[in-house]
Image: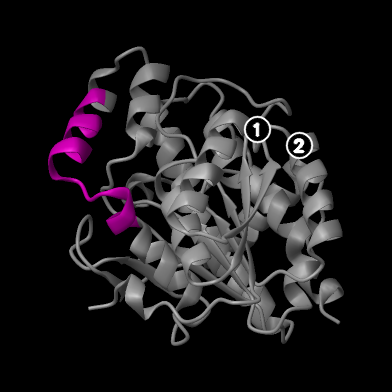
Amino acid sequence: MWTEADVPDQTGRVAVVTGANGGLGLELTRALAQAGATVVMAARDQDKARAARRQVAEAVPGAELDVRELDLASLASVRACAAGIVEDHPELDLLVNNAGIMAIPERETADGFEAQLGVNHLGHFALTRLLMPALLTTPASRVVAVTSVARHVGRAVDPANPHLRGRYHPWRAYGQSKLANLHFALELHRRLEKAGAATRSLAAHPGLTHTDLQSRSVEASQGGASQRFWQAMAHGTGMTPRQGALALLRAATDPAARGGELYAPRWGTVGAPVRRPVVRPAGRAGATLWAISEQETKTPFAIDQLVR
C-alpha cells in the first residue's frame, strides 16, 4: 500500500499548489514540505493562506514556503501570480491544479465565465500555460490536474455553449468542469508527448474526502438539499484530508507514475491511492476543449513552440 512514507526526497524541488490554504491543498503542501520541497502556496484568501503557512511551519520546522495571491476567477490575477512565480522560481518541478468550487448557484467570474468552469478549469488552463516555460526547463517536471468522481456525470464542454447559458444546474456545471479537468490533463499529456517534452501530465481524484469544499458548497447554495447530503456523506463516510491527498501526492511524486495516468482511491471514493483506468479518454473532446480554452482565456497554448 502506497503511503506518505513512499514519497521520495523532494529536496531542491519547487512545487506550486493552488488552493494551498486548506483541505487537500494544505495537506499536500505539508507533505511536500516534509519531504524537502519548496512549496509555492497559491491561494485567493491571503489571511487563510498565511494561517496555513504558520500551520505547516509548525508541523515542519524549516519548511520553505512561499505564499502567493491567486484568484482563479480573475485572469488578471492568474497572470500576475504566474509572472511573480516565474520571476522568483524560473525552474519549476511540479504544478498541482487543486483549487476548486463545487455545486454553487449560477454566477460569473470577473471575465464573464460560468464560475465553476472558470475557476476549476479555465483559470488553471491559463496558469499552466503561463508556468509551462518554467516547467519545460526542469527535468522530470509534472503537472497534476485534480478531477472528481463527478466527472462521470459531466458532459464534454460544448463549443456552442461552454458556460451553460439557459441550461445551468449546479451539479451539471460541476460535472462539466471536473470532466474538463481530466480531459485537459490527457490532452496536455498528448501534446507534451508529441512535442518530445520531458514534462509529464497526470490526473488525480481524492475520492470522497471531508474538507471545507462541502461546507462552502452548502453556504453558497444557502443550504441546498443535495449540497447538504454530500456534506453529510463526506462527514460520515469520507476520508480525512490527509488520506484524500494521497492520490494527489502519488501522482505528483511517485517515480513510477507516467504521463496520462490517473490516480485515485482503490475503491472509487475511499481507499489507498492506486493507478486507475481512464474510462473516459479525451479523444476529440480534448482537442475541442483546448481550442475553447484558448479562445475563452485568450491564451494561446502551443506546446511545440514552447519546447526548446
Residue that numbered label 1 is attached to? 73
Q: Main secondary structure of the magenta part?
A: helix
Q: Is residue 206 visible?
A: no
Residue 66 horizontal side relative to residue 131, left or right: left
Foreground label between 2 and 1: 2
Mark number, residue 77:
2
Residue 259 horizontal side relative to residue 230, left or right: right
Residue 240 horizontal side relative to residue 75, left or right: left
What residue appears at the point 54 percent right and 33 percent down from the top-left corner?
48
Q: Residue most toward the top?
A: 222
Q: Image height check: is 48 above or below 128? A: above
Camera-nearest residue between 69 and 221: 69
Residue 79: give x, y in percent of width and height.
80, 44
What residue appears at the point 82 percent right and 56 percent down from the top-left corner?
300
Camera-nearest residue between 88 and 100: 88
Residue 74: give x, y in percent of width and height.
72, 33
Marks 2 and 1 in Cβ contact (< 8 Å): yes
Tell me which corner region of the image, top left, top right, bottom left or bottom right, holds residue 265: bottom left
The crowd level at tag 1 (other Cα within 10 Å; few <14, some 14-19, many 20+) is many
Residue 42: give x, y in percent of width and height.
63, 46
Q: Is residue 164 visible?
A: yes
| The C terminus lies in quadrant | bottom right
Q: Residue most toward the left?
A: 236
Residue 64 horizontal side relative to residue 178, left or right: right
The crowd level at tag 2 (other Cα within 10 Å; few <14, some 14-19, many 20+) is some
Is 239 one of the magenta-colored residues? yes
Mark number, residue 286:
none
Amino acid carrying label 1: it is: Ala
Magenta stretch: give its range.
228-244
What residue appears at the point 20 percent right and 63 percent down from the top-left corner?
271
| The N terminus lies in quadrant | bottom left
Q: Image height check: is 202 above or below 226? A: below
